[in-house]
Image (spheres, rainbow, N blue to C red):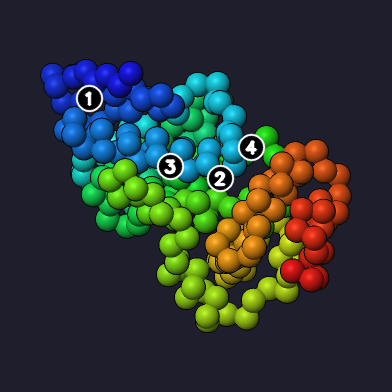
Amino acid sequence: SWCARAQAADTWLRMDTPHFEMAGNVGEGELRRVALKFELFRGVLEQVLGSVPATSVAPRVFVFKDRGSYRPYLPVVDGKPVELGGYFQPGRARPYITLAVSPWAEDPYQVVFHEYVHLLTSHTHGPSWFEEGFAEFLAGSVIEGDRVSLGRPDRRHIWTLRTNTPLPLATLFTIPVPAHDRWRQRLFYAQSWLIVHYLMTQRVQGRQQLVAFLNATASARDLEAAFRQSFGVGYAEM
C-alpha cells in the first residue's frame, strides 16, 4: 500500500511504494508522479530480465522541488557543488537517490536509473561494455504517465559516434571503462550503448540473447566463450 504523511510542519512528505521509500518537499501529487516513474522503471527491468533480485532494503529517494532546496545536498568537488539534476549513492546499508523535479543541468532520471540498473544487476560479473551499455540503454527509457518506451535515440551518444573514430570491437569488448581519458570514456559509453541498442531493438532474438549473456556472466570464467554461446558469434564476427 502507498501511504503519505506530512513531516516538518507539512513541508516534507513521505510515501512508501512496494520497492522505494520516497520523501520530498514537493506536493503529494508530484511525489506520487515521481514514485510511479520509479516503480514503472523497475517494472521495465523485470520485463526485460524476467526477474530481478530483491534488494535487502528499499532505496530511499529524496525529491527536491527546485535548485535552491537541492543545492545544499549536492556532491562537492574542489569546494564547489556539482550541478547535477540527480545523484545515486549506493551506501553500505541502504542506497540513497536524490533528484530535483525541475532539473537545470541534465535529465535526473537518466543518471539515477543508470545506477539503479547497476544495483539490480550487481550479482553478475559481465564485461564493462555490457554493464555500461545495458545501463545506458535502459536508463534512456521514456516514461510518460503510465506508458514506458524503450530505445530512445541518445543525442549525446549519437554526436560522439558521428564525430569520432570508433574503438575497434576487439578493444571495446575487453577493456574496462577508461578512467583517465575523458574522450575514450565518452566513446566507450557511446559504443557500448549502440551495441546494446542494436541487440535490444534490431537483432532477431537479440533481447533473449542479451539476457542469456547476462545470466551466463554470473558464473562464466571465459566471457568470450559465454558471448559466443549466447549470441552464436564471437567478438570479431559481431
Residue tagged 3:
41
Q: How far apart are marks 1 and 3 (CA)?
A: 22 Å
Residue drawn where x is 58% and y is 58% of the image? 200
The kind of secondary structure element at disc 2 is: helix
Q: Distance between the residues labelled 4 and 1?
A: 31 Å
Chain-order first, disc 3 or disc 4: 3
Instruction: Select label 1 or label 3 by which is in front.
Output: 3
Snapshot quadrant of residue 76: top left
Residue tagged 4:
122
Q: Distance between the residues labelled 3 and 4?
A: 17 Å
The kind of secondary structure element at disc 1 is: strand
Asked whether 193 or 12 is in front, the reply is 193
Snapshot quadrant of residue 216: top right
- Looking at the rendered structure, the kind of residue marked 4 is Ser
- Looking at the rendered structure, the kind of residue marked 1 is Leu
Chain-order first, disc 2 or disc 1: 1
Q: Where is residue 92 in the image (x, y as percent from the top left)?
A: 56, 26
Q: Which mark is residue 48?
A: 2
Residue tagged 1:
13
Chain-order first, disc 1 or disc 3: 1
Looking at the image, residue 15 sits to the left or right of residue 179; the answer is left
Looking at the image, residue 78 sits to the left or right of residue 214; the answer is left
Find out whether the residues at labels 3 and 4 contact each other: C-beta distance under 8 Å.
Answer: no
Snapshot quadrant of residue 37: top left
